[in-house]
Amino acid sequence: MANTYTQLYIHFVFVVQDRASLINKLWKDELYKYITAIVQNKKHKLISINGMPDHIHLFVGLNPQSSISNLMKDVKASSSKWINEKGFVKGKFRWQLGYGAFSYSQSHISNVINYIENQEHHHKKLTFNEEYKLFLEKYNVDFDIKYLFNNVN
């Protein structure tokens, strides 16, 4: 009997609309648990999640039966709906369009987990824009600076 074996590790980065710092320390752990449940319900393995008030990093063992874009669509739509239903922010919470998705091999798992778990430390040295631009450059992703995530107004 034939089987399918995969090893697909994806690091996602996505931001709050206009990069507003809306993810509050009081409820961020609840949000991370909610996002973890979304990922697991879609048959993926959530390896690590953390972020800052304006963005989130997810590291996922991807189930090949689902696309990267479908996973991000589900995570962002469901979590923003949940945040709004809970009334965690004034007005309407939205994730900004787009995301970053970067693949890694098995040998890099511990480094990626460490990076995600230490977001607060990294952002003492780098802004989000600097961090994101470094990812794009490191992975040779062609980009136009005017189409990167919007800054806070």
Image (tube, rainbow, N blue to C red):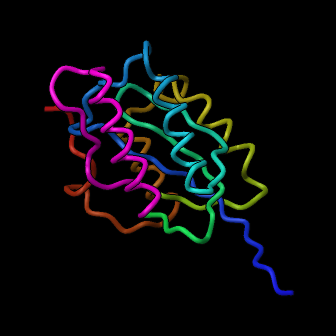
**For residue 70, side relative to residue 48 (left or right):** left
141, above or below 48, in the image: below
Q: Does residue 93 belong to the magenta stretch?
A: yes
**Quadrant of the rendered structure where residue 136 is?**
bottom left
Residue 73 at what x, y percent from top left? 37, 56
**Quadrant of the rendered structure where residue 33 is?**
top right
Residue 72 at what x, y percent from top left? 42, 55
Residue 124 at what x, y percent from top left? 47, 22
123, above or below 78, in the image: above
**For residue 143, side relative to residue 141 (left or right):** left
* x 25%, y 29%: residue: 20
Q: Which residues are magenta?
A: 70-99
Extreme residue in the bottom direction: 1
**Quadrant of the rendered structure where residue 4 is?**
bottom right
Q: Nearer the viewer, residue 142 or 57?
A: 57
Which quarter of the figure is the C terminus placed in? top left
Which quarter of the figure is the N terminus placed in? bottom right
Q: Does residue 138 belong to the magenta stretch?
A: no
* x 56%, y 40%: residue: 36
